[in-house]
Image: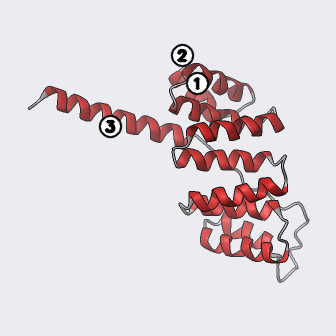
């Protein structure tokens, strides 16, 4: 047996596990409804119904309800963001990115959509694009711990350890638990 072949296999498995760990520590966010929900209401609006389906893990139905809301409210960046997130959870990263693009066009300071688009870009290995999106989210919301944590993962993926560790430390300082674990594991 070739000792280099088994060493190469071990290295490949280690890199796979590290990548899985890092990506699993990333997070995206759903926009919550800003209006009161009446529990006596028999027909919740499509946005609320989409949120309910999303929360229950029924992403195809969530996409359908967010699309219905967009039919009635075509300028709703929240419905675009949430539909993008449901598409992402369904494995349709390109469709998710298209929805996030539209949400950002409609609301240019939409830090959640920048974070979510960055997360989708990580999923398709566009780490530089993800870093740009997370940086935009941080510029718009300087205390956004998820964006710092997510940017750290993207920086780590492009082998920028110093930047990754700085971002994990900042996210940790802002109270992000996963960032604290990553910082302890990779930066100490």
Q: Are marks 1 and 2 in contact (CB under 8 Å)?
A: yes
Q: Is residue 6 visible?
A: yes
Q: Is residue 43 left or right of residue 179?
A: right
Label whose residue precedes the other's in the sequence (1 or 2): 1
Label whose residue precedes the other's in the sequence (1 or 3): 3
Label whose residue precedes the other's in the sequence (3 or 2): 3
Q: Quadrant of the C terminus?
A: top right
Cα distance, mark 1 to mark 2? 7 Å
- Determine the image quadrant of residue 32: bottom right
* Mark 2 element type: loop
Task: Estimate the x, y position of residue 119 in percent, counting from the top left.
Answer: 62, 46
Q: Is residue 111 left or right of residue 62?
A: right
Residue that carries the numbered disc 2 in the rendered image: 188
Residue that carries the numbered disc 3 in the rendered image: 13
At x 48% / y 38%, what residue is drawn?
21
Compare residues 107 and 181 and report the one nearer the observer.
107
* Mark 3 element type: helix
Of tags 3 and 2, which is closer to the observer? 3
At x 91% / y 66%, what residue is drawn?
36
Residue that carries the numbered disc 1 in the rendered image: 183
């Amino acid at each position: 047996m070739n000792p280099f072949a088994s060493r190469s296999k071990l290295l490949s498995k280690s890199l796979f596990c590290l990548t899985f760990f890092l990506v699993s520590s990333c997070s995206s966010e759903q926009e919550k409804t800003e209006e009161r929900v009446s529990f006596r209401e028999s027909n919740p609006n499509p946005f609320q119904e989409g949120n309910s389906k999303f929360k229950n893990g029924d992403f195809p139905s969530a996409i359908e309800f967010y699309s219905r809301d967009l039919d009635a409210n075509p300028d709703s960046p929240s419905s675009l963001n949430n539909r993008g997130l449901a598409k992402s959870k369904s494995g349709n990263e390109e469709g998710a990115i298209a929805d996030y693009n539209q949400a950002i066009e409609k609301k240019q300071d939409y830090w959640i959509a920048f974070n979510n688009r960055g997360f989708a870009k990580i999923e398709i290995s566009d780490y530089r694009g993800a870093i740009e999106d997370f940086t935009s989210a941080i510029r718009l919301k300087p205390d956004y711990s998820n964006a710092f944590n997510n940017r750290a993962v993207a920086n780590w993926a492009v082998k920028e350890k110093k930047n990754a560790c700085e971002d994990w430390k900042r996210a940790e300082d802002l109270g992000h638990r996963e960032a604290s674990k990553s910082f302890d594991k990779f930066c100490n």
